[in-house]
Amino acid sequence: MDVAETYSTGRRVLIERPAVALLVVVLLYLLVDLILKAANVSVAPGGVHLIGGEVPLSNLARFLLDGLIVGLVVGLAGVGLSMTYSILNFANFAHGDYITTGAFSGWLVAYIVGFVTLSVDAPFGDIFLFGESSLVSVMNAPLAVVLGLIASGLGTVAVVLLLDRWVYRPMRDKGGIPLLIASIGVALALRYAIVFVFGTSSSGLTSTSDIPQFDIPVGEGSVPIDLHEITLIVAAIALMFGIHFLLQRTKLGKAMRAMADNKDLAQVTGIPTERVIRATWIIGGGLAGIAGFLIVLERGVISFNMGWRLLLLIFAGVILGGIGSVYGAMAGGIIIGIASRLSLVWIPSDFARVAAFTVMILVLLYRPEGLFGGVKTA
């Protein structure tokens, strides 16, 4: 493409899609500003600050690491939400409370195992209701963490399959809107069932006193990362690769992709649709539960509304990546997570979620179907 064609294309975009042109200008400004801040260069002619400033490289690296951690959790949980939409054709508002269900079921098992293996001098009732704080960590009770991680997935899968049998399956032919409304009712029922047993208080669960911390040199400073954060990153990435293998290399994955593309044609060709739907609930629910367990492992605190508070970010990641696309959910979740944390360079932490949704809206102005576009499982 020569200079004349480039100029013509740019002029056409500017005239026909001014919102896209404005998006490009804003992104370029932020990119240049970030580079100047990292280089400790400030442009302020006549004392009026225009661009640049001072942000240590170690701070930027910490923002990126925190964003990656949040993004991996959002992306992992978003896989199930995206699969539900692509195969069952409804937005499941109970998905956030599946995360909470997995967190509570997994950490309940982890605490019981820790109670047995660590010889804790406390009543079992306090252990069951998380009355004993900071009990379990990867270092002092690795078996409890592993069994809790497994239990978080299995417990959520059991709840999800029961809900499908009692609520969703009888309504499956009624359309997406009745299912969506039913999912809101399911979300409230799950949330307040947890409140009925465990109460509304947040509980500190993981022990941090004996957790190894590693300092990664960055610029003139360093970025600390502890073993719980490393565990979350490794587990989330491994599960994402497992989903990729399932979709691309197994017969079940091919059947799921076929149903996402054309459910009626899949039924005609003999694909066992009920089995695929059951597998969708198992995979989506299991990943949501594990995501809940991992975020509590990293943050150290559990609460009855943690999944609900994450749900908007999960929807944002799924929509940004292209609702219905598993890979879009992964990529969108990571982008949303990094954007929400990197925005702290410019805005207060209270507005981090606003920045994440702003990124989603701006990208959709350019690509309304999302980054991976289309309703498809892979």
Image: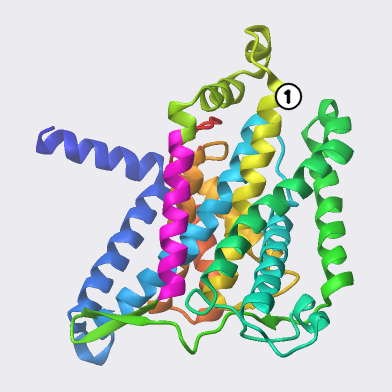
Mark 1: few/some/many CA within 10 Å (<14, 14-19, 20+): few
| Picture layout, residue 62 above or below residue 236 | below
x%, y% of residue 170?
89, 31
* Residue corresponding to mark 1: 274
Name which residue lies at 53% across and 52% down: 76
| Picture layout, residue 33 above or below residue 279 | below
Local secondary structure at mark 1: helix
Q: Nearest the camera: 169 or 136?
A: 136
Please indicate whether residue 282 sits to the left or right of residue 62 in the image.
Answer: right
Residue 190 part of the magenta segment: no
x%, y% of residue 333?
49, 54
Please indicate whether residue 290 sits to the left or right of residue 112 in the image.
Answer: left
Please indicate whether residue 240 sits to the left or right of residue 303 in the image.
Answer: left
Q: Nearest the camera: 102 or 263?
A: 102
Quarter of the picture containing the N terminus is top left
Which region shows up in magenta?
A: 227-245
